[in-house]
Amino acid sequence: MKKIELSRTDLVVSNICLGGGNFGEKLTKEMVFQVLDTFTAAGGNFIDTANVYCRWVPGLANVSEEIIGEWLKLRKAKNGVVIATKGAHYDFKAPQIPRVTKEDIHHDLDESMRTLGLDHIDLYWLHRDDKNKPMEEIVEWMEELVKGGKIRYYGASNFCRERMEKACDYAKEHKLQGFSAVSNQWSAASLNIDNHLERDATMELTDEAYYEWHKNTRMPLIPYTSTANGFFEKLYQTNAEVREGTLITPVDELRLSDKLKKEYLNNRNLKLYEKFLAFHKKTGASLFAISVAYLLNQPFDVIPIGSVTKLEQLNGLLEASELKVENELFEL
């Protein structure tokens, strides 16, 4: 896998980050170990998890972190990988109450460090924002953690552009390290927002204005849902006939979930599918890999977070890491 030095940091990481959101729920511990072993054997070294992962399952705690912590210990891999984890997510029993407080951040971070068996976190994300809290105050909390040696760098997940602008201005004015990256929803496919079935008001999309902000500031983007749930590959596998952005195959004949149809079937995505398909026919690369590699070729650092539910799905991420694409080929 290709590696890059992440802008605003000295972290050298694989250009695709392995997401741990399915660890412990859709993947057993044994399967997770296989995925982690395969990923690192291929040169991957960037792993993402969160204190909240698996807490949505009744009776489970931060199981994703637990499994990764076990793997790190058994494989003696602590010095060979870069671990990113997240805290300050709301409690699923009380989603209306934000947990972006100094106390909750410290609680989640300390628990994550114990669970992972680490004495510091390389990249620590705030998983959610609380717009009632001044960004200046949040930045100062995170700077304290950097100075205390508990974290090396910190990032913002699901923070809006206006809040990030305030945070960056404050950090620059006070000569602070500031946020090193943003993690919001983004993929090659455009979401049909009104039909986004799992929409959570606390989640943030990377829209056109946000993209331009990244372009102008060179703030790294480490997006989740970066594979669009495999939309382009699944469209290909179902033998969809598309012509000039119009679906010729009847919608009810597509072997796609209702969720994918409602969220991603639109003229823009179908036009892009045709471009990806032409590149596939020319190179033999899978549409899954093409759609992820498309994200890598941007005027600022982008490291997609990719999650899998079975070991063989990892192949598409590994393929994307090495795939050379020129986005000019996909201009619509």
Image: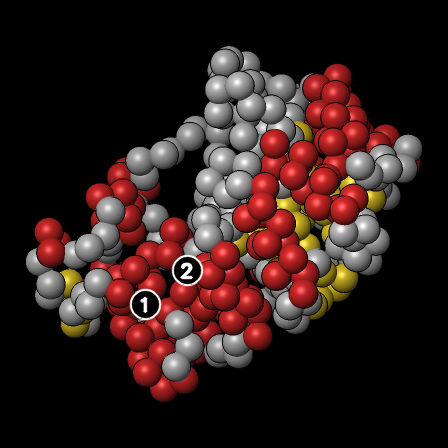
| Residue 28 visible | yes
Residue drawn at x 33%, y 62% is 232
Residue drawn at x 62%, y 49% is 33
**Left or right, residue 287 beside residue 301:** left
Amino acid type at circle 1 is Leu
Q: Nearer the viewer, residue 27 or 91?
A: 27
Q: Position of residue 14 (x, y in %)?
A: 67, 63
Report the coloring of the rendering: secondary structure
Which residue is labeled 1 in the image? 272
Are the residues at dot 2 and dot 1 in contact (C-beta closer than 8 Å)?
A: yes
In the picture, which quadrant includes the N terminus?
A: bottom right
Query: Residue 291 occupies which quadrant of the picture?
Result: bottom left
**Left or right, residue 145 beside residue 294:** right
Mark 1 lies on a secondary structure that is helix
In the picture, which quadrant includes the C terminus?
A: bottom left
- Please say if 162 is above or below 325: above
Q: Nearer the viewer, residue 325 or 18?
A: 18
Residue drawn at x 16%, y 56% is 254
Q: Which mark is residue 188?
A: 2
Of pointers 2 and 1, the one earlier in the residue sequence:
2
Tell me the CA gap for discs 2 and 1.
8 Å
Q: Which mark is residue 297?
A: none
| Residue 139 visible | no
Q: Nearer the viewer, residue 182 or 18?
A: 18
- Please say if 316 is above or below 254: below
Amino acid type at circle 2 is Ala
Mark 2 lies on a secondary structure that is loop
Q: Position of residue 50 (x, y in %)?
A: 63, 35
Q: Position of residue 118 (x, y in %)?
A: 82, 39
